[in-house]
Amino acid sequence: MSTQDTTPLDVERIRDEFPILSRRVGGDVTTPGEGPGDETPLVYLDNAATSQTPDRVVDTIADYYRSYNANVHRGIHSLSQEASVAYEEAHDRVAEFVGANGREEIVFTPGTTEGMNLVAYAWGLAELGPGDEVVLTEMEHHASLVTWQQLCKRTGAEVKYIPVDEQGYLDMDAAAEMVTDDTKMVSVVHVSNTLGTVNPIADLADLAHDHDAYVFVDAAQSVPNRPVDVDDLGADFLAFSGHKMCGPTGIGALYGREHILEEMQPYLYGGDMIRKVTYEDSTWEDLPWKFEAGTPNIAGGIALAEACDYLDEVGLERIETHERMLTAYAYDRLTEFDDVEVYGPPGDDRGGLVAFNLDGVHAHDLSSIVNDHGVAIRAGDHCTQPLHQKMGVPASVRASFYLYNTREEVDVLVDAVDDARRLFA
Amino acid sequence: MGLGSDMYRQQILDHYKNPRNYGELEDATFSHVGENPTCGDTIKVDVRLADDGETIERVAFSGDGCAISQASASLLTQELPGLTLSELDAMDRDDIVDMLGVDISPMRIKCAVLAEKVAQDGAKIHTGELEIDRTKTEE
Ligand SMILES: Cc1ncc(COP(=O)(O)O)c(C=O)c1O
C-alpha cells in the first residue's frame, strides 16, 4: 500500500481495465447496449451516482458464480466452505480498508441508505424519545435526511440542521451551539454529493463526543476517492456503497464501533443471524452476523473486497490528487462563463464533483444536450431537495470525476455546455 | 447524434423561446395547475369552453420549467381549440409525441405530457369526475 504517494495516475492504462469507457453512445436509447446510430464516444462524468466497474471486479463476480457459488454459513460441503471463507474474509478486507478493528465492526448492507436505516431502526427506535435531538446538516443526502427526519417523527425526538453558508461550508459556530447534552446523534455527510464540500468530520465528532452523542458519517462520496480512517474521523458509525467505488450495486458496508453494535438489537430477523432458537425465544449470532439476516449478497461482498484491493493498488492518495486536479480544472473552465453558476466551495477545496446551472437553460435540457456530445452527467436534485430549495433552484446538473477521467473529457463537457448556450441563445 | 439533438429541433426551441397563448384567460371555464416535482416543471392551463359546454374554444398556459414541458404546453394551446372534452380525454402520450414531431427520450416523456395531463385533469375536475388540487406526473 502506498503512503502519501501522489504521483500522477497512468490514466491510459487504468482505462484499459474499464471496457465500458470505450463504448459509443447515441442512437436509440430505449434498448440497452450499443446499436445503430451509436457513434459518439462516451464521456462518463456521473461517478458520484455510480462508478464503472473494472474487469477484475467483474471477473471476481463471474468467478464466484462459475466456480464456488454456494450458500454461506449453512453447509459442511466444500463449496459452502469456500464461499463462507471468502465472504467472511471480505469483511476483514473492508474493515482494513477503512481502519476498523476487524470484521466485528463491518456489516455488509445493500448500500449507504440501508446502513443509515439499520442504525436508525436498531439504535434510534430504542434510544430516541421526546427531549432528544438528532443534529444533521442542511446538505444531507435524502438517505440520511429523510431517515432521521422520519425516525424523529416516530420517536418524538427533534431534528436540527447545521446551516450551510453562502460558500457551501458548514457554519461551525452554529454547530457548536446546536449540539447540546440533549443531542444523541450527529449525522453528517463527509463529502457533499451536491456542493462537493469536504466537511470537518473530526471537529464535529469532538463536538458530539463532548456531549456524549454518537457520530454517523455518510461516507458514500469519500470512501471511494480518498483515504478514510474511522478513528481519524472519530466516527461511531460510517456507511458507504460499493457501486460508487468500483464495486457492484447492491452491496455496501456499515462500520459501527464494536461496543455500540454489541448493545444494539438486531435490525432484521431471520436465518443466519441467530444462535439458538426455541418456540419461545431466540439468541443472536456474534457480530457482524447478528445484523446480516438471510442469505446475503455473497458475490457482491467478495467483489467489494476486490474493489478495495484495486483501489489500494492504484493508491487512494493518487486518486484523490487526480480528482482534485480534474475538479479544479472543470471549476475554472466552467466559471469562465458568466452565465454559469457553480455551487459550493472554490475549485481547489472540494471533492471530485461540480454542480452547476446555465442561466436560462433548465438542468434537464442542459443534460439532454450535453448527452448528445456523449457526456453523461446527472441532472435533477441529486437527492438533496431541501438544499436545492435553499440554493433557490429546482435542479442542477452535476459532473463528477473518478480515477479514469481526463482533462480532455472536461473539455468535451465544457464545449457541450457552450453548445447548449448557443442553441438556447 | 442521438435523440437529444432531435428533441431540440427548431419547433421546440421556437415554442420555448416564444410561447404561444402564454398567460391567463379572464373568462376561463376552468383552470388547473400541475407539476413534475422532481424537475420543478410547473404548468397552469386555462380553458374556455364554447356555449355547448363541450367544445374547447380557447386555451392559455403559464408556468416554467424545461424546454420540453413549456414547448409542449405552448403547442397544446394551439392543438386543443375545436376539440371536445372527450376528445381531450382520449389523448395519450403518442398524440403528444406526434404533436411535438420529435422522438422524446424515455426519461423526458413526463416533461412532454405534463400540460396534457393538467388539461385532462382540469377537465375532469370541471365535470366532477376527479377531486384533486394539483396534478403531479411521476414516472
Ligand atoms: C452522500 C450520499 N449519501 C448516500 C447516498 C445513497 O447511496 P445508495 O443509494 O448507494 O444507498 C448517496 C448516493 O446516491 C450519496 O451521494
Image (tube, coloured by chain):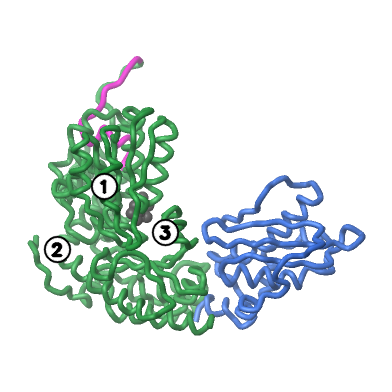
Amino acid marked by disc 3: His
Which residue is the site of mark 1?
A217
Which residue is the site of mark 3?
A382
Q: Residues within 10 Å of mark 2 (few under 14, many from 20)?
A: few
Sequence-first disc among 1 and 2: 1
The answer to whether residue A306 is left or right of residue A139 is left
Rendered location of residue B12, percent (x, y): 62, 77
Residue name at image x 26 percent, y 64 percent = A350
Callout 3: residue from which chain?
A: A
Amino acid marked by disc 1: Val
Distance from disc 3 to disc 2, alpha carbons, whole Å, reads: 30 Å
Label 1 SS = strand
Asked if labels 1 and 2 share a chain, the reply is: yes
Q: Main secondary structure of the magenta part?
A: loop
Sequence-first disc among 3 and 2: 2
Rendered location of residue A347, percent (x, y): 27, 70
Residue A313 is tagged as: 2
Label 2 SS = helix
Colour assignment, chain A: green
Tell me which corner region of the image, top left, top right, bottom left or bottom right, holds residue A290: top left
Rendered location of residue A257, percent (x, y): 19, 38
The magenta region covers A280-296
Ligand 1 closer than 8 Å to label 2 CB:
no
Callout 2: residue from which chain?
A: A
